[in-house]
Image (cartoon, grey):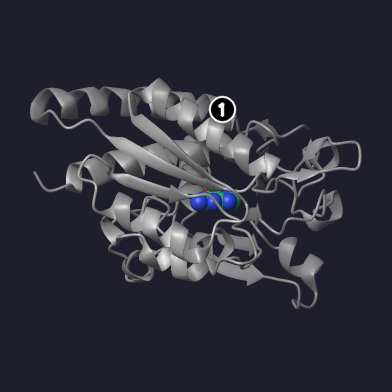
Amino acid sequence: MSAQIIDGKAIAQKVRSGLGEEVASLQAKTGVQPHLAAVLVGEDPASAVYVRNKQRACEQTGIDSTLHTLPAETTQQELLDLVHQLNNDPLIHGILVQLPLPDQIDELAILDAVTPLKDVDAFHPENVGLIVQGRPRFLPCTPHGVQQMLIESGAEVAGKHAVVLGRSEIVGKPMALLLMQKGEAANATVTICHSRTQNLTEITRSADILIAAIGKPEFVTADMVKPGATVIDVGTNRTAEKKLVGDVAFDEVKEVAGAISPVPGGVGPMTITMLLKNTLIAARLAKR
Ligand code: GUN
């Protein structure tokens, strides 16, 4: 039997409409207009699309956004200067520096420069530390989006075996933390797999929840999935024919899994939605 499809686009719309109401209510009560500043350095076409989608989503939710586009040859100091300017601007609540950055720029130095109270990506070490300790200020956008998808799909997570494929700082590592911690769609027994993992298929086949975030097109095949498992695909890869595919071979895995998220229309819209949520939280945190 074919799996339940976890429609990230539909879930994102539902969450965004609730956020829109919260934005309007914050404005009405306090006069604060949430405002996200997005910074795009260089001409990477995929990054430009991501940033445009983030701005559109802000508009849809009543959040203001300003895009700062800088040329590919921008120096680290020039980018730091912009970040400092945004840190000190009382009308800006969230700062998003789109990654990747050009090679001449030290990415960590830039992310560390974003003031933690405006760090809506939750990349700053202070915010990561708060997440690790289970007292988050902002939740990381993609892992939080995945968690919302698990909640909305009705997946049982507590006490189950969750396997995270990938150990990136943006997705794999924080995803494992959220699934392991106490809370809703959490309390799982978590295994993280990566490029050096041995007996990978044995491990993935024991997963009740399988999160694929390794950046390899259609890497997860049907034989790697336990019948009835919930599979969430975080991958966004372009094939040689420019088709967008995830890290999961969707057509064959959907015949084995109990529930599966598609690409596109799965995790992507949820990541953006959680960015909006963090921008609203940042606006509430802002000193008045
Ligand atoms: N590039 C790819 N994913 C992300 C993300 O979640 N945030 C930022 N800032 N850049 C990215």
- Residue 177 in sight: no
**Residue lying at 55% horizontally and 32% vertically, measured from the top left:** 52
Q: Position of residue 173 (x, y in %)?
A: 54, 67
Callout 1: 10 Å neighbours few (<14), some, many (20+)? some
The quarter holding residue 206 reads bottom right
**Residue lying at 46% horizontally and 48% vertically, measured from the top left:** 141
Count the marks: 1
Q: Is residue 161 left or right of residue 194?
A: left
- Residue 22 in sight: yes
Q: Nearer the viewer, residue 165 or 83?
A: 83
Q: Position of residue 187 (x, y in %)?
A: 43, 61
Q: Position of residue 102 (x, y in %)?
A: 63, 59
Kind of residue indicated by mark 1: Lys
The residue wearing badge 1 is 9
Mark 1 residue CB less than 8 A from any atom of ligand 1: no
Q: Quadrant of the C terminus?
A: top left
**Residue lying at 47% horizontally and 31% vertically, measured from the top left:** 55
Q: Quadrant of the N terminus?
A: top right
